[in-house]
Image (cartoon, rainbow, N blue to C red):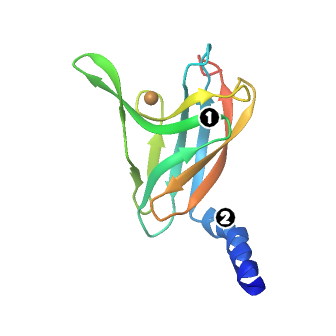
Amino acid sequence: MRKFVFVALAAIAYAPAALAGGLTVSDAWMRSLPNGLPAAGYFVLHNDTAKAVSLTGASSPACGMIMLHKSEMVGGMMQMSHMDKVDAPAGGTATFAPGGNHLMCMEPKPALKPGATVAVTLSFADGSSLTANFPVKNASGK
Ligand SMILES: [Cu+2]
């Protein structure tokens, strides 16, 4: 039993390091809106592994919950729709940027305010995850 626990802890300790070489996040930021409105998260996921990855969810201590959303023009109106997953091909990227894919941070906590930095954990279909720091900007992206 003792040995099993040790092995399990070792696996947790080494997993992020193993992942860091292949899967990275750049250009991460959160757009904070006033009055407790949902915040939007943007980033670029770089997949420098030989396998496609599927981003299936995200979470943050600064958000009640995070959904994967896509903004698109439908009949001249900007609409948001929910996505179950977003793929990053082997050697490719998945981009979350204003006007397109975004993380929707529902019920943002007080910690999510311009000037702060919040941690967001991205979850993948294979059960792995990656945590990145997202600087928080105001509604105009400053
Ligand atoms: Cu949204």
The picture quadrant where one finds residue 101 is top left
Which sits in the foreground, 66 or 100?
A: 66
- Cα–Cα span, label 2 and label 1: 22 Å
Relative to residue 96, is residue 28 drawn left or right? right
Q: Which residue is mark 2?
A: 16
Q: Which residue is mark 1?
A: 63
Q: How many marks?
A: 2
Residue 26 drawn above or below residue 29 = below
Please state, as top left, top right, bottom left or bottom right, where the C terminus lies in the image. top right
Residue 83 drawn above or below residue 56 = above
Q: Residue at x 58, y 44 (%)?
A: 59
Residue 59 drawn above or below residue 81 = below
The picture quadrant where one finds residue 54 is bottom left
Which sits in the foreground, 23 or 36?
A: 36
Relative to residue 106, is residue 62 drawn left or right? right
Percent from the top left, x then y, of residue 129?
Answer: 58, 58
Q: Which mark is residue 25?
A: none
Q: Residue at x 39, y 53 (%)?
A: 87
Q: Residue at x 65, y 48 (%)?
A: 132
The picture quadrant where one finds residue 51 is bottom left
Q: The residue under label 1 is which amino acid type?
A: Cys
Q: Nearer the N terminus, badge 2 or badge 1?
A: 2
Q: The residue under label 2 is which amino acid type?
A: Pro
Instruction: Identify the secondary structure beneath mark 2.
Output: helix
* Quarter of the rendered image showing ligand 1: top left
Q: Residue at x 76, y 80 (%)?
A: 6
